[in-house]
Amino acid sequence: MEFAIAELEEWMRRYYHNVDHDIGSSGVRDLTMGELAAICEFELSELGPMVFHDSESFGGRGLRKALADRWTGGDVDPVMVTHGSSEAIYIVMHTVLVPGDEVIVVDPAYQQLYDIAAGMGCRITRWPLNRHDDFAVDLDALRRLAASRPRMIVVNFPHNPTGVSITPQQQRELIEIAEEAGAWLVWDHAFGELTYSADPLPLPFGSYGKCIAFGTFSKSYGLAGLRVGWCLAPPELLSRMAVLRDYIALYVSPVLEFFAEKAVRNADRIVSLQREHARANLKTVLHWAGELPDLVRAYPPAGGVTTFIEFPGHPDVTGLCRRLAEEERVLLVPGRCFGDSYTAHARLGFGGTAAELTAGLSGISRLLLG
């Protein structure tokens, strides 16, 4: 078994900690410990009695119950706490798939959503968003692709990196397509709570028996450093996933679960604050792009804190992004990290501070106009 290089993580490893202004990441502004404590109204002294004891394979009871109250009507049986959603993705792929299985994945996509399966010997079929129509979905195309009865269909809406989403009716049709194909529907909910023009989509988990959903505290909460996520899946599948997990990470630290539980119990407050911050930053991005119509095309996102900007004069923006990091000390992620078909695009993240965003956009402008 051999994995391809994770292009996004490789780019981040090279530049993320070596720039001054990050406008490439996909998460909201990181909270400080003090801010989290103030929002969630707890004292760090509450950690005093904690014993450094093992947590449980499926997650600590307090955090699992908090997640269940938010996502499954209080039923803890389908809930597993994970090390970010990345651990959930890895364990799910290795538990559900076998070599030769077909996996349909939305395109472009976060590489781990398809290359783990590819490394296992699965066949990857791409379901492309329509780049000529602001990356809109084409469900008729998905239905045609799913006629082959794939083992799994993998999607994430709001989408990374474009920020586009679907309507509740489109979501229902997507579920019907998966059900007709008998496929596992993998729903990456990383950006699901942070939307602008419509209410967040409901999790499809519970409306279709072969649905698996992932979530994370990194994207909409501003708690990337926790490295905590969650997975919803049928209990019998979680039990099989736990067998593999016993060889990898065993459980999530109870220290991290303490903070994650506080965040879940106060999720609406946290997400509301982050949404208003991101909405103001989005206006800045769209205004900036509007002043450079021949050099930049930005697609207004429906959710999340990224937009997949296009540079019409640059068929491959990798060099531009490298110069931006090395000369302007600004992080932007080249589109090739999401597939070879997107070299003229770059992921621009607007979830950070307003000052960081303004400085980063100014750096792009200097390179484009210089």
Image: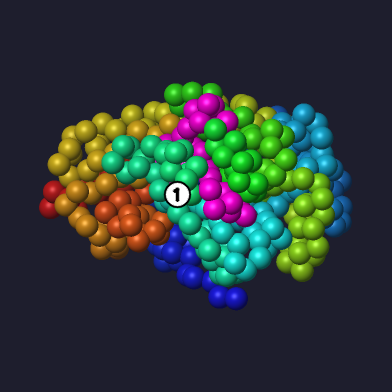
In the shown orientation, is residue 345 left or right of residue 182?
Answer: left
Q: Secondary structure at mark 1?
A: strand
- Quarter holding the N terminus is bottom right
- On screen, residue 158 versus residue 69, left or right, reads left
- Residue 74 on image: x %, y %: 80, 31
Q: Name which residue type carries label 1.
A: Trp
Q: Which of the 4 image quadrants contains residue 162? A: top left
Q: Main secondary structure of the magenta part?
A: loop
At 33% from the left and 51% from the top, the residue drawn is: 346
Residue at 38 percent across and 37 percent down: it is 136
Q: Is residue 4 visible?
A: yes
Nearer the observer, 295 or 284: 295
On whether residue 41 falls in the magenta region, the answer is no
Q: Residue 177 versus residue 199: which sits nearer the camera? A: 177
Number of dots carrying numbers: 1
Q: Residue at x 67, y 43 (%)?
A: 211
Whole-percent x and y of residue 51? 87, 52
Q: Position of residue 332 (x, y in %)?
A: 35, 53
Please tell me whether residue 161 is drawn above or below residue 71 in the rendered image. below
Residue under numbered circle 1: 127
Measured from the top left, where is residue 81 in percent x and y? 74, 48
Residue 112 visible somewhere in the drawing: no
Write down the region rendered in magenta.
146-172
Crowd around label 1: few <14 · some 14–19 · many ≥20 (10 Å): many
For the point 33% across and 57% down, the residue is: 341
What colour scheme does the image use?
rainbow
The residue positioned farthest toward the front in the image shown = 147
Q: Is residue 161 magenta?
A: yes
**Residue pushed farthest top?**
198
Relative depth, front residue between 31 and 82: 82
198 versus 3 height, above or below: above
Q: Is residue 349 left or right of residue 287?
A: right
